[in-house]
Image: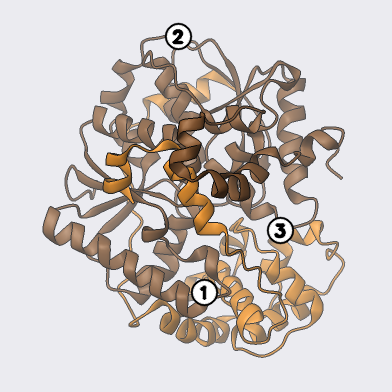
Chain colours: A brown, B orange
Amino acid sequence: MALGGDRITFWFGCNMLRHAEMIRLSIMLLERVGYNVSAAGGPAYCCGTAHDHQPRGASNMAGRTVARFNEAAEKDGRSTVVTWCPSCHMHMADIMAPGNAAAFDVTHITELLADRVDRLAPLLKVPVKRRVLLHRHIGFATHVPVTDRVLGLLSHVPGLELVEGPAHPGHMCSALAAVPGALTAAVGETWTTAVANHADTVGTIFHSCHRELSALDGNDGVGVRSWVQLVAEAMGIDASDAYLDWRKGGAPDVAAIERADQSKYHALVEPELRKPSPLLAAPRGMAE
Amino acid sequence: MDRRRLDQMADASHFSEMTKLQVARAETTEAFLAQAGPELASLCTACGACFNACPMVDHLGLRGSDPKSATHGMRRLAMGEAGHADTVSWVGACTKSGLCVAACPERTAGLDAMLLIRIAKRRALNDTHQLPAKQDPTYFPRLKIYARLQLSDEELAKWL
């Protein structure tokens, strides 16, 4: 193993800001297996991959983010950057580092947890009586065997039963959204396979898949849970999921909306939460 | 899923894999991409293997198209020259499945097919303007609202 030490930067990316509980659970899991974690993410740590149409701006964002991680490595001894998002991870490996000298190594959270599964497994004591179909994609295996890593971690969860499901194109659901029919096909196939195999839970690996599947939670008696939530349940932690609740018709409390800026909430966030899911509009499984 | 397979996964010794970062070859990512496009394109033989391996080809209805023509066009795009409409449609639909990487016979020569296709896509966006730029000025503001809805003051200060 080539890790430079136990002091790490957990780079959770931009879009994980929709899922604060998953960030906190990820930090908690890393800390429980012995890492000293400093978390970083959001626009100030953008990798630039979502800004391909602005090459100069994307390049500047990438340079700024690498510089911040270099500073964390040099001044705070955090010479390992741990990713959650496959887009960030691939962008760092393939484009950011070749264009900016990096003083750190990069690995994925599932690799670190798998590496210390001997410390994690004894903490998983509470049976999680779920029959789980793991929603997965074929991409990102070029960099990290993430599906095997997550399946390996979930295999230590007592009571949890895994059922086979299809692997979909792309590295996560957001990549498929721009290709007509691709997203609906992938999510529809996951759901119909889960129902056909009597799964009661669809497990997600990445945030964008979780975001898409959240709207289906509870349909056909099937719930949606992230892999970190499933591991947390086995530790006796009943992980809440605000985004999922909001996507299904709930809303943040008034104080939180006022703190965030009520007008911006109504203009920018509410339309996303109330947007009808195309997966519910079409007969499931048929995905165009 | 076969429980034995899961047990094998659970029992297998595991050593954390780091993604080995490349040594920087340029001063910025923009400069790197400008340099890497022609370099990777020069390694490409336009054999069509990446096109054949790509699952998006089916979604786009391009499975009957000539793979060599598509990859020849992709190579041109990566060098900043206009490509055929089918080629533009194909590279524009890259979802990073990564099957092209292993399918490429020039991989051992240093050709990262997925990176070449990504560069071709960027060129089609910014140089040949054959793909429309999808600008969303609300992208970061929306994320900041999500952050303020959920993160404590301390988390906002430390993480962002």
- Per the image, label 3 sits on a secondary structure element best described as loop
Q: Position of residue A245 (x, y in %)?
A: 59, 27
Q: Residue at x 62, y 68 (%)?
A: B135
- Type of residue at label 1? Leu
- Per the image, label 1 sits on a secondary structure element best described as loop
- Tell me the CA gap for discs 1 and 2: 47 Å
Camera-near label (2 vs 3) is 3
The numbered mark at residue A127 is 2
Please give the residue where the numbered disc 1 appears in the rendered image.
B111
- Type of residue at label 3? Ala
N-terminal of the two: label 2 or label 3? 2
Q: Position of residue B144 (x, y in %)?
A: 46, 51
Please give the residue where the numbered disc 3 appears in the rendered image.
A178
Camera-near label (1 vs 2) is 2
Give a yes or no on whether discs 2 and 3 share a subunit.
yes
Front-lying residue, B48 or B87: B87
